[in-house]
Image: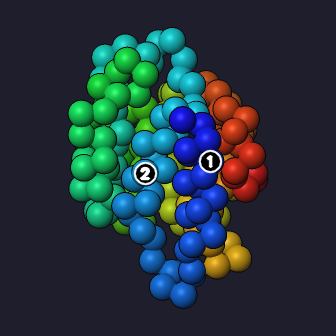
Amino acid sequence: MKKIFLMLSLTLSIGFAAQAQEMDYRIHSVFLYNFTKYVQWPATAQSGDFVIGVIGDSPIYDELVKITNGKTAGTQKIVVKRFKSADGVDACHMLFVSWSANFEKVQAKVQGKPVLVITERAGLAQKGSGINFVIRDNKCRFELNEDATRSAGLKIASELSKLAITV
């Protein structure tokens, strides 16, 4: 499984051109699903449903619903939820913050909780997002803020760290 994810990641990073500069939410949803395999949440977060939240208006919601249908993260059933604002965010394992969402409010809401915050806007990894999708050298890549993930109580597998741009 690790080899498949690594091959997929390498293929994707080679195959993306930045000329369109649009995020491909089908691909991002594949990445999010695969992140569940390379991130370890604390024991307190390993029961009930595995919740992937999407905050703001983003096409990734529909793609995540499709790709995670009937799938699990470990032994937990994956459930995708949409939130209109940070005020409505409840317990999530992963939270994708769209362009339209207020990142600072989201950060304040999930501070100290075991939530992997994933963004798609330049500079947000440096501001505390755990993972941030970027286009570098005409390729779709992702940044990893190890301090942010550690502060959230998450452990990132070395295989994932090696693929990331560490900030």
Above or below, 96 against 60 in this view is above
Give the image location of residue 119, x and y in percent.
51, 56
Q: Is residue 74 visible?
A: yes
Q: Distance between the residues labelled 2 and 1?
A: 12 Å
- Left or right: where 109 falls relative to 50: right
- Left or right: where 137 falls relative to 139: right
Between 108 and 77, the one lying in front of the other is 77
Give, as a three-letter code, the residue at label 1: Leu
Considering every residue shown, the one lying at the far bottom of the view is: 19
Give the image location of residue 138, x and y in percent.
64, 79
Between 69 and 91, the one lying in front of the other is 69
- Left or right: where 144 falls relative to 52: right
Between 131 and 140, the one lying in front of the other is 140
Residue pointed to by mark 2:
30
Above or below, 38 against 153 in this view is below
Image quarter of residue 68: top left
Residue pointed to by mark 1:
6
Give, as a three-letter code, the residue at label 2: Val
Q: Is mark 1 on a helix, strand or loop?
A: helix
Between 116 and 161, the one lying in front of the other is 161
- Front label number (2 vs 1): 1
- Left or right: where 128 falls relative to 37: right
Q: What residue appears at the point 63 percent right and 69 percent down from the top-left corner? A: 14
Q: What residue appears at the point 57 percent right and 80 percent down from the top-left corner? A: 17
Q: What residue appears at the point 64 percent right and 27 percent down from the top-left corner? A: 155
Mark 1 nearby-residue class (10 Å; few <14, some 14–19, many ≥20)? some
Which quarter shows the N terminus?
top right
